[in-house]
């Protein structure tokens, strides 16, 4: 499975020792990556993370770190040529990237 | 919060402002807040169609500010939205029959999730829009509801700190708002982003319009200069990559977009290659070479278009897409160029055989 799956690893790092169990990360995650636990939130499905960065930004104690960004090949490939990595949306008639 | 309300009148002759404060709770002039309807008009639907086709791309905007739905009171809920018509209209049409406020923030005409990713749907803009619209004098409570997909740009605790308003994240889909208003709870399913067939289908037109700008000249030129068989195959590759791929994506094998694209490409072009092989045009060796070239060039094109669909999905991570590009771009380019060179070689060879 590993062979044709580039999405098994990502940049999400969670430190349960810092967690204050406020549950904001569970609330904002669109992929149910976190679930509630007794003392602290549990990182349940790390591989489902799409690196949107919502959990990191809404964690009041910085227990979560993720190198957030948009997974858009069109923008990355174009960025490799033009030197700027920017999602197509909002740049005028470019691709339907993240419409 | 502040009970005293102060206001300043226009300048007097000396150029000074006259200000007074009242300790009474003033009734806000709610009629001055522009009303938004919760029913969408034909003009709204026309605007949505244009947006979905990628026409006048940056023109689907709403004036930022505070709007009312129905006849809200100071106790009514406040929903935050982006100043993109598809976002704003999805919200207001889901509030049919309710009295509420909508705080439209300036995201430069970009939808909630995209703008959140860029940070324009963000803490700073929400805080400043709360201040600009004097929201704290209009509502008596201190709660705002922000769409969950705005969370990548918003820091809830920072909004509370800077504006005094507590953030509650609403459901992912505006269509779940009536259920949220009835039950006041959000289920895990309402928190999870999905990518249904319908979600994927609505993305096809904008991708197609974008690619046709380049594809139509390519199809016509190849038809005139080389052969209409080639034009037909280019068209088929584009249909496979931009229409069939989004439709069939979940059912294609493997996890990577590129390998799914290759698989689809080979399935589609195998009959074409067989057709070339069995045709009566030229030598067997030429036909075999051309058939092989087809199987090299076109699946690579389909795979490339499939890879470009990553940005339209709500789950492809940047780490994963980076890895895909690293893994597959060179094989794609190699197969494509190999196929082009092979077909060119076959063309030359067929001329040699004839002469």
Image (spheres, grey):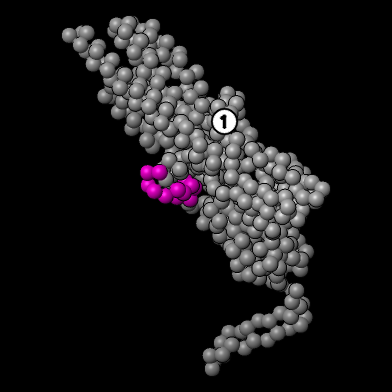
Residue at point 75%, 48% (across, down): A41
Q: Is residue B259 visible?
A: yes
Q: Which residues are magenta?
A: A80-91
* Residue B255 to residue B121: above or below: above
Residue at point 69%, 42% (across, down): A33
Quadrant into which the N terminus of chain B falls: bottom right
Residue at point 31%, 19% (across, down): B342
Quadrant into which the C terminus of chain B falls: top left
Task: Report x, y in % for residue B336.
Answer: 37, 26
Task: Report x, y in % for residue B57.
Answer: 47, 48
Task: Report x, y in % for residue B200.
Answer: 58, 34
Task: Report x, y in % for residue B196.
Answer: 63, 34
Q: Chain letter for mark 1, please.
A: A
Left or right position of B126 against B286: right
Which residue is most to the left?
B355
Chief secondary structure of the magenta span? loop
Left or right position of B165 against B200: right
Which residue is most to the bottom?
B14
- Is residue B285 magenta-colored? no
* Residue B281 to residue B183: above or below: above
From the viewer's side, name the closer residue of B183 and A5: A5
Q: Is residue B246 visible?
A: no
From the viewer's side, name the closer residue of B24 and A96: A96
Which residue is most to the front?
A17
For disc 1, the marked residue is A5
* Residue B237 to residue A73: above or below: above
Residue at point 60%, 67% (across, down): B128
Dot 1 crowding, Cα within 10 Å, few <14, some 14–19, many 20+? some
From the viewer's side, name the closer residue of B96 and B338: B338
Write down the quadrant of residue B212 in the picture: top left
């Amino acid at each position: 499975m590993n062979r044709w799956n580039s999405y098994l690893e990502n940049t999400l790092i969670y430190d349960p020792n810092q967690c204050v169990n406020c549950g904001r990360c569970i609330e904002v995650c669109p992929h149910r990556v976190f679930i509630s636990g007794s003392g602290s939130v549990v990182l349940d499905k790390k591989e489902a993370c799409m690196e949107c960065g919502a959990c990191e930004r809404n964690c009041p104690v910085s227990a979560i770190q993720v190198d957030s960004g948009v997974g858009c090949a069109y923008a990355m490939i174009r960025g490799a040529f033009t030197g700027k990595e920017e999602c197509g949306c909002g740049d005028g008639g470019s691709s339907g990237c993240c419409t | 919060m502040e009970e005293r309300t102060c206001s300043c009148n226009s300048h007097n002759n000396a150029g000074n402002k006259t200000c007074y404060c009242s300790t009474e709770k003033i009734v806000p002039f709610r009629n001055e807040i522009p009303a938004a309807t919760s029913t969408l008009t034909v003009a709204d639907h026309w605007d949505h169609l244009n947006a979905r086709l990628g026409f006048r791309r940056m023109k689907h905007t709403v004036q930022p500010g505070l709007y009312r739905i129905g006849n809200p009171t100071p106790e009514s809920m406040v929903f935050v939205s982006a100043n993109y018509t598809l976002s704003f209209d999805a919200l207001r049409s889901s509030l049919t029959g309710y009295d509420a406020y909508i705080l439209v923030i300036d995201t430069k005409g970009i939808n909630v999730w995209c703008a959140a990713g860029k940070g324009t749907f963000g803490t700073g803009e929400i805080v400043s829009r709360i201040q600009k619209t004097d929201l704290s004098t209009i509502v008596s409570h201190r709660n705002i509801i922000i769409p969950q997909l705005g969370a990548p740009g918003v820091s809830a605790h920072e909004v509370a700190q800077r504006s005094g308003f507590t953030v509650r994240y609403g459901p992912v889909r505006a269509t779940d708002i009536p259920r949220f208003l009835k039950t006041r709870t959000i289920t895990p399913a309402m928190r999870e982003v999905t990518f249904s067939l319908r979600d994927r289908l609505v993305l096809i037109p904008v991708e197609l319009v974008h690619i046709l700008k380049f594809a139509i000249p390519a199809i016509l030129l190849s038809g005139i200069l080389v052969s209409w068989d080639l034009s037909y195959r280019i068209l088929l590759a584009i249909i496979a990559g931009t229409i069939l791929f989004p439709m069939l994506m979940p059912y294609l094998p493997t996890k990577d977009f590129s390998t799914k694209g290759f698989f689809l490409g080979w399935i589609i072009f195998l009959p074409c290659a067989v057709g070339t092989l069995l045709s009566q045009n030229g030598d067997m060796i030429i036909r075999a070479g051309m058939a092989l070239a087809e199987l090299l060039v076109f699946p690579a094109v389909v795979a490339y278009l499939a890879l470009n669909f990553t940005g339209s999905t709500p789950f492809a991570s940047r780490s994963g897409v980076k890895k895909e590009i690293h893994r597959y771009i060179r094989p794609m380019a190699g197969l494509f160029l190999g196929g082009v060179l092979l077909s060119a070689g076959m063309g030359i060879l067929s001329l040699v055989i004839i002469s």
